[in-house]
Image (cartoon, grey):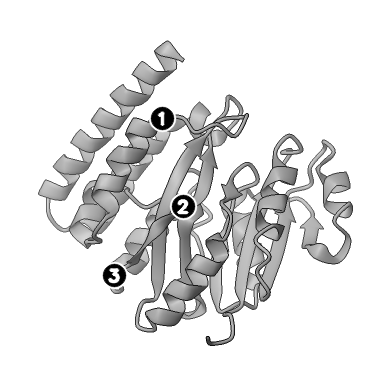
């Protein structure tokens, strides 16, 4: 087998001492031999820094004020030296053996520049929830197309990885976007390079009362629609996107009501 590609993972963090240890452990527990792990903390005022210090040389980290999540991720990307890049938010987790699956995929598909896998939705207690929403996204993600991506954001951010040359060609996340910087990036690079699909569960996306996505999910879908309009030359993907967002919003509201 070829030597493992170097994978750089960036975790942006701010006052996430309740979950960041689980996030870090999920990365280190991979046992991946060619890993670079960077935690970019925004000057947390809770015990996050103490948690980071407890890992010694196992991780690289900085703690200083930044201009938000996108800015923190970009700082990490500028520091990263890996062949494959990704970011994992400080309340999400990787599932076991995920990085090996990512390495195998990129080794076997040299022509593919970026790829995404499946992702579970989990709660504060690491229990899988919202399985219907996961199934809905799984249905859409089986085969990539740009028009489909304009119609629905089926790509799971915690389970998405890209080669270094993507960053060299397309730059960094748009730091003016605070909720949909991932979707904007997917649409930016997806115009030129189709994404590959890793048919495995790679990550767990955590939703909880304090998470940005839980507190702002209505605005997030409005922002997604705005970004889709920016990149679409035709109207029908935007209509489809609106209908898909409306369906998911109804689903979220029903789940909130009965949870």
Q: Secondary structure at mark 3?
A: loop
Mark 1 = which residue? 130
Residue at 55% x, 35% y is 212
Query: Mark 3 and mark 2: span between their CA atoms?
Result: 16 Å
Residue at 59% x, 34% y is 126
Q: Is residue 191 above or below residue 26?
A: below
Q: Furthest-front residue in view?
A: 1
Residue at 68% x, 74% y is 33
Residue at 43% x, 73% y is 105
Mark 2 = which residue? 157
Q: Quadrant of residue 86?
A: bottom right
Query: Could you classify mark 1 by the number of other residues whose Cα lies within 10 Å: few (under 14), some (14-19), or many (20 or more)?
Result: some
Q: Furthest-top residue in view?
A: 258
Q: Secondary structure at mark 2?
A: helix
In percent of width and height, residue 66 lies at: 70, 52
Q: Is residue 146 above or below residue 7?
A: above
Mark 3 = which residue? 194
Please tell me which of labels 1 and 2 falls first in the chain.
Answer: 1
Q: Are marks 3 and 2 in contact (CB under 8 Å)?
A: no
Query: Is 202 positioned to the left or the right of 139 in the image?
Result: right
Q: Is residue 243 visible?
A: yes
Q: Furthest-bottom residue in view?
A: 2
Query: Mark 1 and mark 2: span between their CA atoms?
Result: 17 Å
Q: Quadrant of residue 209?
A: top right
**Residue in the foreground of this view, choosing between 58 and 95:** 95
Query: Could you classify mark 2 by the number of other residues whose Cα lies within 10 Å: few (under 14), some (14-19), or many (20 or more)?
Result: many
């Amino acid at each position: 087998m070829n030597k493992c590609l170097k994978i750089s993972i960036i975790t942006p963090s701010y006052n996430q001492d309740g979950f960041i240890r689980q996030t870090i452990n999920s990365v280190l527990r991979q046992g991946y031999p060619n890993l670079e792990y960077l935690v970019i903390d925004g000057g947390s005022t809770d015990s996050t820094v103490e948690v980071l210090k407890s890992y010694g040389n196992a991780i690289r980290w900085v703690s200083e004020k930044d201009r938000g999540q996108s800015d923190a991720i970009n700082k990490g990307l500028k520091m990263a030296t890996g062949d494959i890049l990704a970011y994992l938010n400080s309340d999400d987790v990787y599932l076991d053996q995920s990085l090996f699956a990512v390495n195998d995929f990129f080794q076997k598909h040299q022509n593919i520049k970026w790829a995404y896998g499946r992702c579970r939705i989990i709660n504060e207690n690491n229990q899988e929830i919202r399985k219907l929403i996961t199934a809905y996204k799984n249905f859409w993600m089986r085969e990539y197309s740009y028009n489909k991506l304009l119609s629905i954001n089926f790509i799971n951010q915690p389970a998405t990885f890209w080669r270094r040359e993507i960053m060299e060609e397309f730059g960094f996340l748009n730091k003016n976007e605070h909720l949909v910087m991932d979707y904007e990036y997917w649409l930016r690079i997806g115009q030129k390079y189709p994404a590959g699909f890793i048919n495995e569960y790679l990550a767990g996306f955590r939703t909880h009362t304090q998470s940005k996505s839980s507190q702002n999910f209505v605005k997030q879908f409005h922002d997604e629609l705005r970004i889709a309009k920016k990149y679409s030359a035709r109207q029908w993907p935007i209509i489809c996107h609106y209908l898909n967002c409306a369906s998911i919003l109804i689903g979220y509201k029903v789940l909130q009501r009965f949870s």
